[in-house]
Each structure stands twice: as C-alpha cells, then as structure tokens.
Image (cartoon, rainbow, N blue to C red):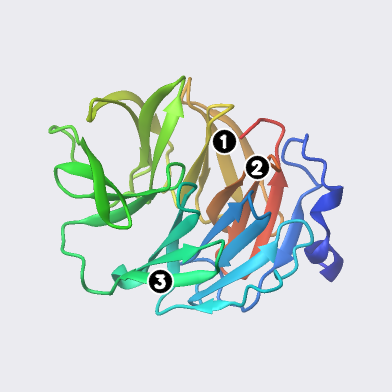
Amino acid sequence: MNSSSITTSLLNLNLDATPSSTNVFFRVQGDAGFHNGANFYSEKYNMIIACPADNTVQFYNATTLLPVEGRKTLHLDSSVLQISYSAETDTCTLKCMHGNIYSYDLRNHLLTKQQKCGETRNPVYYQFLSSSGQISIRNEQDISLTRSLRILRKISLPQDWKPEGDFPKVENVIINGKEHVIAAEANGIIRVWQVVKGEMTSVKVINIGEKISWFVYLEKSQVIVTTHGKEYIKFWSLASGKLKWTYYSDEIKSKDVFLMNGKNAIGLADSERNIIEIVPLLLGL
C-alpha cells in the first residue's frame, strides 16, 4: 500500500458501489493496531473517532482524513473496547479494558470518567447498544438498558437460554418497525429476538460457523456484517440467515467494523496496524 492510497480523499468515493476497488485506506497515529480498539463515525460532525490499542482517542475529518483541528488526542488509562453514541445528549460512552467507562462530550470536547477500574462486580458484563446510545449491563437474568449508568429499563433473558461465553457485541435494533435484540455468541452463533413488553422471544438463529470478532447491522437492507479477525468480512441476510457474499480486503485483518451513515459505507480497522479501510456499499445502511 503506497502513501497516496492512505491519504486519498473521500470526496472522490463512489458511494453507490458494492465493496470495490474504490475503497480508501488511511493511517492513524501510532502502531498498536486495533486488536483491542474501537472506532465511531459521527455524521453530525463528519468525524471518525479512532481508538487503537495504545489507550488513545483520535479525531479525523471523514472527508480529508486529516486530524480535526481543535480536537487534541486524548489519553486514557486503558484501551477502548466499545463506543456507544447518544444523540439525545450528544455524547459517546467509551467502554475500556479493566472496567473503566468514560463519557465524551462531542460538542465541547470534554472527557469524563464515569466508572473506575474494579467497580464492576461479576457476573455482570458491560455491552453496548450503539444504535440506541445506551449501555447494556448483562447478568444472569436480564439486560439493563442504561445511560450514564442509570438504569432506564430491563429486558428479561429467556430462562432456558445460557450463552456460551460473553457476547462480543449486542445491538438493540428496529426490524420492520418492531424492537429487536441481536447478539453474537463466542461460539459463532448469532441470535435475534423480538422484544415485547420487556420480554425476549427468539425469531432467528444464524450459525456463522466460525468465531465472530464483531458485527454491525444494516437496518435498511436487513443485513448483518461480521468480522473474524481475518482478511475478509461476511454479509448475512437476516431474512434467510444465509451468507449473501464475502468481501476480501487486500490490506486489512479486521476485528472492528463500524457504520458510516450518511456516506453509505462501513469502516474496517486492522487488528495489527493503525490502518482503517473505508468500504462503500451499494445496499443501504
């Protein structure tokens, strides 16, 4: 990959394309990679928030792919694992390793620690519902939907269901106008539930066939995109539960994938290097 391919502007992207050679690569500061990292795209600020595994939070203009003026790199106690955005408060909540949780005020560029390491009691697991801007606190009985660690409501887990290991990702989504929860298990199973009055009813089980690193849900096209820490990502039909296609990257071993609403694209972050690939899509987000 040459330097020009890293710094290509998004202005020239054909965003009405299937995953194609028009993809853009760019490098963020450092060299720790994103094996324990996360990324977020803000359509409101046209900005990519990049959090590689070196405990930093970096800010890039999503058009020029250059650092955003006036937003200095933030340094945390540990690396960011998940990011959730609340449009209501215009803040990102950052879940970090070792239990640290921060909130980031996008408008005022203000970082606040919400929870210190060691304050979490097992068997409680923090997961993020990025589409709703809420944190999900999962324990043995339920999923608590919270904001700033204040419980808003709970969703009861099915009593006869015991997941294998922790979820790598949980999403609270709208499918055909109804609330659903999508979760990926460590054994390569994706489960979809409909939520009615706080109760979860299973509607779909998809066997991915390999360990899932991360996933995002494309609401308009009803497609689940999975990463596996390898040079490819997979697109799964929610309706049929079958693989629609596989996209192979020439440069990225992707663990993290994030939506770029408004640009009709997804971003992939390399596990071993501080490189992000932006992939334009034909199907809507």
Residue at 55% across, 69% down: 109
What crowding class fits label 2: few (fewer than 14 Cα within 10 Å), some (14-19), or many (20 or more)?
some
Residue that badge 2 annotates: 247
Q: Secondary structure at mark 1?
A: strand
What crowding class fits label 1: few (fewer than 14 Cα within 10 Å), some (14-19), or many (20 or more)?
many
Q: Earlier in the sequence, mark 1 or mark 3?
A: 3
What percent of the width, then of the height, locates residue 12? 86, 49
Q: Separation of disc 2 and disc 1 at Cα? A: 8 Å
Q: Separation of disc 1 and disc 3 at Cα? A: 36 Å
74 lies above or below 147 = below
Discs 2, 1 touching: Cβ within 8 Å? yes
Query: How many numbered badges does the structure rendering display?
Result: 3
Which is more foreground, mark 3 or mark 2?
3
Q: Earlier in the sequence, mark 2 or mark 1?
A: 1
Residue at 74% across, 60% down: 25
Tell me, for residue 267, which label it has, or none: none
The one nearer the camera, 125 or 101, is: 101
Residue that badge 1 annotates: 235
Q: Secondary structure at mark 2?
A: strand
Q: Earlier in the sequence, mark 3 or mark 2?
A: 3
Tell me, for residue 112, which label it has, or none: 3
The one nearer the camera, 155 or 18, is: 155
- Image-based side of 90 in relation to 99, left or right: right
- Image-based side of 283 in relation to 16, left or right: left
Q: Residue 155: in sight, yes or no?
A: yes
